[in-house]
Amino acid sequence: MPLTRNNNDSESLIVRNRLNQRNFRARRQQYVQELEQKVRALEGGQLDTARRIQHAARLVAVENQALRAILREKSMLSEADIDLHVNQAIQAAKLEPQPRLLGTTENELGIRKWLEEQGHTLVTTSDKDGENSTFDKELVDAEVIITTPFHPGYLTAERLAKAKKLKLAVTAGVGSDHIDLDVANKTNGGITVAEVTGSNVTSVAEHVVMTILLLVRNFVPAHEQIERGDWNVAAVAKNEYDLEGKVVGTVAVGRIGQRVLRRLKPFDCKELLYFDYQPLSPEVEKEIGCRRVESLEEMVAQCDVVTINCPLHEKTRGLFNKDLISKMKKGSWLVNTARGAIVVKEDVAAALKSGHLNGYGGDVWFPQPAPKDHPLRYAKNTMDGGNAMVPHMSGTSIDAQQRYAQGVKNILDSYFSGREDYRPQDLITYKGEYATKAYGQRK
């Protein structure tokens, strides 16, 4: 695309455009700093990161328009060329347009205006740790709590004892193990705990398959080699395998586990296995091409890859400990996108170091956020690889955020309207009783 209609003046326009880019960056930085000072003064020195990002984004929009005005006034560029130069300036300032986040602190699930129009007050905070946190202070008067499973506000027995007005606790996503559910059932006549069941299943299942491939194909060390400027194919190929012909097993075959198996079917694995208290129907087993193993120890002993897709409850906490891991095939891979506390982190790290496990990957940690000295941040196998850990992100893709944001709004509408016509699958506790078997409530 040409930079200008007037080819004779193209060189000077290029120079002016570069100057505009530099001015754009300088003005943006100055304005952001001035704004931060003003906000600090207003908020008593407490500047919330999400708020700062939002204000900076507004400034970017203003500067975007200012740059357009300069280009219109000082050049003969067409609107299309102006668009080109503005985008170049934004990219030069490392302000490429980003997907719209709906997470609870970034854009508050898009529900602030809707709630305030009904007369409700919404308090948003990422300050959730310690007795003097904003979360603890606001909990005393809160009727509804909304939190994500990715950086949760833990509702412990101690916190629930302070929450005298709490009636509804909503998980923006899936997984309510950050709440003491037994205590919630006994608090304030029974706190309703709900989550947006199904909102993350596609996202997590895709992440599981991706992580399996990253580990089996030894992708991470190979990519790190390229980043370092090295080139040693033999160093990474010596621990690279095909997924075809391998035995893969899932611990639990619910909404996510079943989708994982379906996505693995085209890879022509030797066998697809599952362990679950509730078997699939013979028709579904035949369709997927999978087989149930009644003993977890028996299943992991057969698998080249084990993926954990079960909820965290009293029977699964610490399930993958030294004893169970020792029963896995030597050189196998373990993937965990369920909950960090299902594995004993020290035992996983030791199994990697010894070579019993060839790799561990996933996105869940205990606690969350993971401290800097968490052993699974740095654990490696005997070939200095085998780590495919990332922050808790598998269930919060932009598409998943849209699903759980709408689901939270539906739950709130059901509560505030008095209808309480919740989707049955969304309820974890209701009227002082468990409404699900997902948290170890087996009959």
Image (spheres, grey):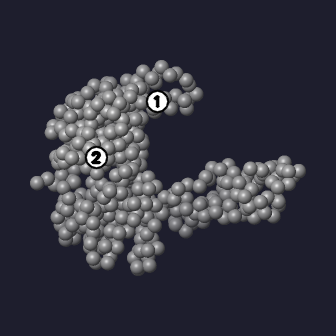
Marker disc for residue 44: none
The mark lying in front, picked from 2 and 1, is: 2
Amino acid residing under circle 2: Gln
Question: Image point 62% across, 53% down: which residue?
Answer: 95
Point out the residue furthest to the left here: 443
* Front position in the image: 166 or 304: 304
Relative to residue 87, is residue 435 depicted above or below?
Answer: below
Residue depicted at x 21% and y 67%: 430
Mark number, residue 258: 2
Q: Residues within 10 Å of mark 1 (few under 14, many from 20)?
A: many
On-image quarter of the C terminus: bottom left
Q: Is residue 163 something one can see in this rendering?
A: no
Residue 321 vs 119, above or below: the answer is: above
Foreground residue among 188 and 397 = 397
Secondary structure state at the residue bearing disc 1:
helix
Q: Is residue 196 left or right of residue 224?
A: left
Q: Residues within 10 Å of mark 2 (few under 14, many from 20)?
A: many
Residue most extreme to the right: 8
Considering only vertical position in the picture, is 132 above or below 144? above
Q: Position of residue 136 (x, y in %)?
A: 35, 63
Q: Earlier in the sequence, mark 2 or mark 1?
A: 1
Q: Secondary structure at mark 2?
A: helix
Residue 436 appearing in the image: yes
**Can you say whether 278 is above or below 52 in the image?**
above
Give the x, y percent position of residue 353.
Answer: 34, 27
Residue at left 72%, top 54%? 85
Q: Check disc 1 and give the amino acid type.
A: Pro
- Residue 221 is marked as 1
In 3D space, how far apart are the residues under numbered discs 2 and 1 (Cα atoms)? 30 Å
Residue 93: image x %, image y %?
66, 51
Circles 2 and 1 in contact, beta carbons < 8 Å: no
Q: Nearer the viewer, residue 316 or 236?
A: 236
